[in-house]
Amino acid sequence: MQSQHMQSQHIMILGVGSVLFGDEGFGVRVIEKLKEIYEFSENVSVVDGGVLGLTLLGIISESDYLIVIDAIRNKGAPGDLYRLEGDMIPARIRAKNSLHQVDFLEALTLCQALDKVPETVILGVEPMDIETLSVELTPTIQKSVDPMIDMVLAEIDHLGASYHKRSN
């Protein structure tokens, strides 16, 4: 059973953002839909990180792989999807300047201090509007939810974990 090793790796899918500011809530909305449609193997946690900030630290440090879903300003067109990993991450997060990102960066930095940094991939969407007080995603960004779910599932496949659609 060569897949046993991968099954013991803990994978966390973490959606971050504030659902009160339109597209800023993208990560959380993707998590909600993922939970609604799919069931994952036991070694996969699907977490609505919201704006938990440093309370994320305990959760993050328990995982071996971290897949973060978020709205990221990356100088693209609204709705563009990104996959960032390794050295691309800190610079992009610092460029984002939003409240929860600072907390998230602190949490990751503290993980480094604890010598337990999960392998991290950030899957992001270029937001259209993260200033307006609204619990709805803009139509453009709403259209990016399903393609983003496909990206998340591709990461899960790559990591050797399993999932299936819930039977309603």
Image (tube, rainbow, N blue to C red):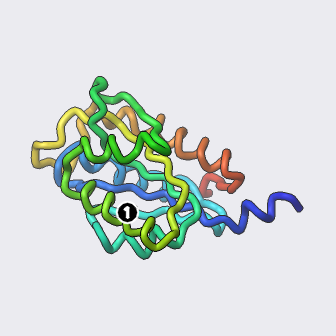
Image quadrant of residue 56?
bottom left
Where is residue 40 drawn, in percent x and y? 61, 60
- Disc 1 residue type (three-letter): Thr
In the depicted structure, whether residue 73 falls above or below residue 107: above
Picture residue at 57% right of the left edge, 55% below the top: 38
In the picture, the quarter occupied by the C terminus is bottom right
| Picture quadrant where residue 15 is located | bottom left
Q: Is residue 144 left or right of residue 43?
A: left
Which residue is tagged 1? 109
Q: Which residue appears at 66% of the width and 63% of the height?
A: 41
Q: Residue furthest left?
A: 132
Position in image of residue 120 (x %, y %): 50, 53
| Quadrant showing the N terminus | bottom right
Q: Is residue 121 left or right of residue 105?
A: right
What's the residue at 45%, 40% (across, down)? 84
Q: In front: 146, or 128?
A: 128
Task: Please tell me which residue is depicted at 18% across the width and 42% down the height of the picture.
Answer: 130
Q: What element does badge 1 sit on?
A: helix
In percent of width and height, residue 148 lies at 46, 39
Q: Nearer the viewer, residue 46 or 166?
A: 46
Image position of 111 (left or right of 21):
right
Instruction: Name the spot of residue 119 as percent of width and height, x first.
Output: 55, 55
98 up-or-down from 124: above or below: below
